[in-house]
């Protein structure tokens, strides 16, 4: 039996290493995971109450159309309910976009170092992938625009970008969107937008009024801290959402995800708290990296990409032995690691371990 030839070479997704694995493999009691951009402050108490309240219902299928959650999102963002689609995390929205729009040989454009699931899902559809180098860790929108042809179907813009954490501003984004042909769909992945404090950061949902060929992706996995209940969403033009609904798995979200997401949306205090804590964590990392003489990209999400100046796989292994998990091995940044912001205590432990690792490497020469 042979699978489709275009999937034979695909790697299985490598998530951040689980804490339990590291404890078991290395016999460590305390392990800190700063590898998957999760929320170290947990999730909203209101979401917890909603989950507990729903537990009696989990033997019956969820509402496939997420009626109540859709209404809550529509109200919060001032969009129509037929502009919204939910998925098993926004990863599922990415999959549905590739599945809906890409036929073999169609072209799709993305940055060369960005969220890996864009490329992965486009490869499954046998599309031709055009990767455009980041410029100083940032999306090079004019270069991406220049690569659009009459075969281009989807263009992916991750803002803030994972893994570099950089952003494109509203002026840059609208200048780009003004020139993208109307039959090319731009996917604006805003998984980390709620963390951004920078003035001039675009709100993709506001741009939907002007650009019909735009879809904005968001998730409850990051600032809302609901990564394990798997719920994310896309907001776009009703026609785009309709086609995606036609290929959506019938029950691609769960009861627990739906109620937790709805409750989380109204807990603005929790979101504000996480945003402030995250910013303080980033500022702390900046100050420590400056002290250590290390370069890093401007970080707008809940993670920082820092240049350790030695191979990142070695840094990863050495940090692991000290009980800290980070994300190494970036194709175009071989000496950078990506570290998620943790609690103040976790951040300090990471810095202490990282400094030791760098010192040990310097001694070995
Ligand atoms: C940029 C970006 N988009 C989407 C996702 C998918 O998140 P989820 O499927 O948990 O919503 C992630 C997860 O790390 C991400 O970094």
Image (cartoon, rainbow, N blue to C red):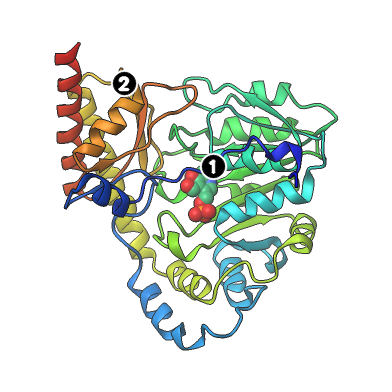
Q: CA distance from mark 2 to mark 1?
A: 26 Å
Please tell me which residue is depicted at 29% across the width and 50% down the height of the picture: 276
The vertical placement of 90 against 103, above or below, is below
| Disc nearest the viewer among 2 and 1 | 2
Q: Label 2 belongs to which residue? A: 295
Left or right: 203, with 249 as reference point: left
Neighbour class for label 1 at 10 Å: few (<14), some, many (≥20)? many
Residue 209 seen: no
State the residue position of label 1: 202
Q: Nearer the viewer, residue 222 or 270?
A: 222
- Describe residue 156's horizontal placement relative to residue 197 as left or right: right
Tell me which label, 2 or 1, sits earlier in the chain: 1
Residue 160 drawn at (x, y percent): 48, 39
Residue 239 quadrant? bottom right
Task: Specify the farthest residue to the bottom.
Answer: 56
User: Going by the picture, which residue comes out furthest to the top?
Assistant: 365
Q: Inspect this view and state whether residue 65 appears.
A: yes
Q: Position of residue 89 (x, y in %)?
A: 54, 58
Residue at point 37% right, 59% down?
A: 271
Seen at 58% across and 52% down, the residue is 91
Q: Which mark is residue 93?
A: none
At which x and y percent is residue 127? 76, 36
Q: Residue furthest front?
A: 1
**335 relative to 40, above or below:** above
In this orientation, which residue lies closer to the viewer: 170 or 195? 195
Task: Indicate the secondary structure of the residue bearing disc 2.
Answer: loop
Quarter of the image for residue 34 reads top left
Between 329 and 74, the residue placed more toward the observer is: 329
In which quadrant is the C terminus drawn? top left
Q: Determine crowd level at label 2: few under 14, some 14-19, many 20+ residues with C-alpha closer than 10 A.
A: some
């Amino acid at each position: 039996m042979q699978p489709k030839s275009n999937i034979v070479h695909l790697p299985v997704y490598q998530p951040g290493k689980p804490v339990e694995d590291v404890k078991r493999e290395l016999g460590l009691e305390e392990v800190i995971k700063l590898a998957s951009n999760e929320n170290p402050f947990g999730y909203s108490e209101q979401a917890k109450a909603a989950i507990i309240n729903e537990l009696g219902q989990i033997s019956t299928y969820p509402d496939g159309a997420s009626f109540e959650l859709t209404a809550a999102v529509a109200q919060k963002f001032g969009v129509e309910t037929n502009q919204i689609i939910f998925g098993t995390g926004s990863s599922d929205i990415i999959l549905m976009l590739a599945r809906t729009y890409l036929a073999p040989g169609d072209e799709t454009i993305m940055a060369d170092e960005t969220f890996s699931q864009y490329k992965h899902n486009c490869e499954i559809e046998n599309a031709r992938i055009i990767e455009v180098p980041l410029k100083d860790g940032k999306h090079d929108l004019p270069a991406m625009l220049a690569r659009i042809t009459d075969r281009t179907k989807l263009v992916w813009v991750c803002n803030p970008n994972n893994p570099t954490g950089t952003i494109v501003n509203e002026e840059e984004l609208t200048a780009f969107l003004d020139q993208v042909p109307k039959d090319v769909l731009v996917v604006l992945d805003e998984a980390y937008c709620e963390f951004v404090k920078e003035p001039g950061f675009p709100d993709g949902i506001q741009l939907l009024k002007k650009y019909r060929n735009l879809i904005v992706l968001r998730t409850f996995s990051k600032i809302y801290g609901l990564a394990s209940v798997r719920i994310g969403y896309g907001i776009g033009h009703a026609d785009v959402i309709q086609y995606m609904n036609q290929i959506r798995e019938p029950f691609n979200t769960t009861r627990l995800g739906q109620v937790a997401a709805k409750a989380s949306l109204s807990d603005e205090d929790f979101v504000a708290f996480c945003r402030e804590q995250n910013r303080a964590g980033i500022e702390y990392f900046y100050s420590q990296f400056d002290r250590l003489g290390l370069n890093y990209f401007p970080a707008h999400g809940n993670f920082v990409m820092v240049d350790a100046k030695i191979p990142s796989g070695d840094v990863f292994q050495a940090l692991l032995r000290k009980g800290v998990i980070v994300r190494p091995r970036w194709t175009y940044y071989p000496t950078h690691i990506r570290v998620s912001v943790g609690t103040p205590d976790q951040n300090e432990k990471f810095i202490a371990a990282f400094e030791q690792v760098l010192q040990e490497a310097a001694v070995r020469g």
